[in-house]
């Protein structure tokens, strides 16, 4: 039995949701560059769940249903107000709220195709309301109800800030949501599929995925990137700061990716958005520091940036709290998790790999009273 640490290179299942082949990322065969440049997030969600892009009527119906399902039971927010707010990370709050949300869904334990897709729609819609609701509650504000007529991206910003966002802000969030929607069999997606392969319920699968995404080696990387940029402070400090990290052999968040050889194709879109937004806000130093870090790390270590690196300065430029970066990732990635869960339910087999045993053999049992 061979041992492959971290399952690197192991093909664990088949999937038609997304692919990474020769450093090209596609959703259902559509290249990420085209989707990032031309599609709304709603189109991408429909594509991931239905294996085709919607026509105008299908998109309108889907978008309308999505917004109609954004309302969250008041009990979810009432319980949030009991959290020890000062000590609760938004990802922990999200994990708890999604698990609790399943208690209010009378179809939660059904796994047939039609019901599962209805649950997927409700989860996709409500996760944005949960993230924004918690963000407001911890600041002593009441959650904001979604607004009909606004897109999913616009509603997210509206529910977060209580005012309708500008077009540039909507474009930035929409693009970030599209870029983060799915990424083949990443850690959180694999976790979701392992969970529901036992025929556990949809909410358990998504709760499990959120738990995996919370880690700094997965979704939590973008928050760590912004912490690093803030510590650097000025472009003139980049060389010394990064060199110290090299010398200490510390991991630099936002660089490299196990499945890409020549670079993450999503990164350039957020790099361009970072440039645009930092110029609008007048805080171009965040883009400039990011570029300087990229140049040093890529030149000296051969590691190009991944999607997390420039998403940090994009979200910061939108005035979003740094610890909300990973929950925003989850708001997008739940679309992919949903697609993979639907796919797993449709052709299920329990996921049960083996482990290569490396412990001691032929141990002799010694009665308790005879042990030293």
Image: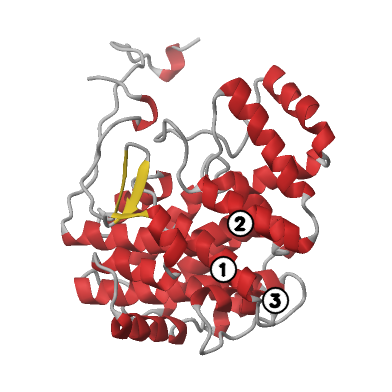
Residue 321: in sight, yes or no? no
Q: Which mark is residue 171?
A: 1
Q: Which residue is mark 2?
A: 273
> Residues at badges 2 and 1 in contact (C-beta under 8 Å)?
yes
Cα–Cα gap, marks 1 and 3 = 16 Å
Residue 189: in sight, yes or no? yes
Is 282 situated left or right of 245 in this image? right
Q: In which image quadrant can residue 260 be found?
A: top left
Q: Dot 2: within a 10 Å radius of its alpha carbon, few (fewer than 14), some, or many (20 or more) residues? A: many
State whether residue 261 is above or below residue 223. above
Residue at point 63%, 28% (across, down): 297
Label 1's element?
helix
* Mark found first going from the N terminus, 2 or 1: 1
Q: Quick one: 72 or 161, which is closer to the camera?
A: 161
* Mark found first going from the N terminus, 2 or 3: 3
Q: In which image quadrant can residue 4 be found?
A: top left
Label 2's element?
helix
Q: Position of residue 175 (x, y in %)?
A: 51, 62
């Amino acid at each position: 039995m061979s041992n492959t640490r971290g399952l690197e290179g192991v093909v664990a299942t088949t999937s038609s949701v997304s692919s990474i082949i020769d450093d090209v990322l596609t959703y259902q065969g559509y290249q990420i560059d085209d989707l990032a440049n031309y599609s709304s997030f709603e189109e991408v969600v429909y594509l991931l769940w239905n294996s085709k892009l919607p026509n105008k009527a299908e998109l309108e119906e889907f978008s309308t249903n999505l917004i109609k399902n954004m309302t969250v039971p008041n009990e979810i927010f009432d319980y949030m107000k009991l959290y020890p707010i000062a000590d609760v990370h938004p990802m922990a709050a999200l994990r708890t709220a999604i698990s609790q949300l399943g208690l209010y869904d009378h179809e939660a334990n059904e796994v047939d195709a039609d019901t599962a897709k209805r649950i997927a729609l409700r989860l996709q819609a409500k996760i944005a309301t949960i993230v924004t609701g918690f963000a407001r509650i911890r600041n002593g504000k009441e959650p904001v109800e979604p607004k009909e007529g606004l897109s999913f991206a616009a509603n997210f910003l509206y529910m977060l800030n209580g005012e309708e966002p500008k077009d540039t802000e909507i474009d930035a969030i929409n693009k970030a949501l599209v870029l983060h929607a799915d990424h083949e069999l990443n850690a959180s997606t694999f976790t979701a599929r392992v969970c529901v392969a036992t025929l556990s319920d949809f909410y358990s699968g998504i709760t499990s995925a959120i738990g995996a995404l919370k880690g700094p080696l997965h979704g939590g990387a973008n928050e760590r990137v912004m912490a690093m940029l803030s510590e650097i402070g000025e472009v003139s400090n980049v060389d010394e700061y990064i060199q110290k990290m090299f010398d200490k052999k510390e991991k630099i968040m936002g660089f490299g990716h196990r499945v890409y050889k020549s670079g993450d194709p999503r990164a350039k879109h957020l790099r361009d958005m970072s440039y645009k937004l930092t110029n609008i806000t007048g805080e171009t130093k965040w883009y400039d520091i990011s570029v300087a870090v990229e140049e040093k790390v890529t030149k000296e270590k051969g590691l190009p940036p991944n999607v997390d690196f420039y998403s940090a300065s994009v979200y910061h430029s939108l005035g979003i709290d740094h610890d909300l970066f990973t929950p925003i990732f989850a708001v997008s990635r739940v679309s992919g998790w949903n697609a993979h869960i639907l796919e797993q339910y449709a052709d299920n087999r329990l996921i049960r790999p083996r482990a290569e045993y490396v412990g001691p053999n032929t141990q002799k049992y010694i009665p308790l009273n005879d042990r030293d």
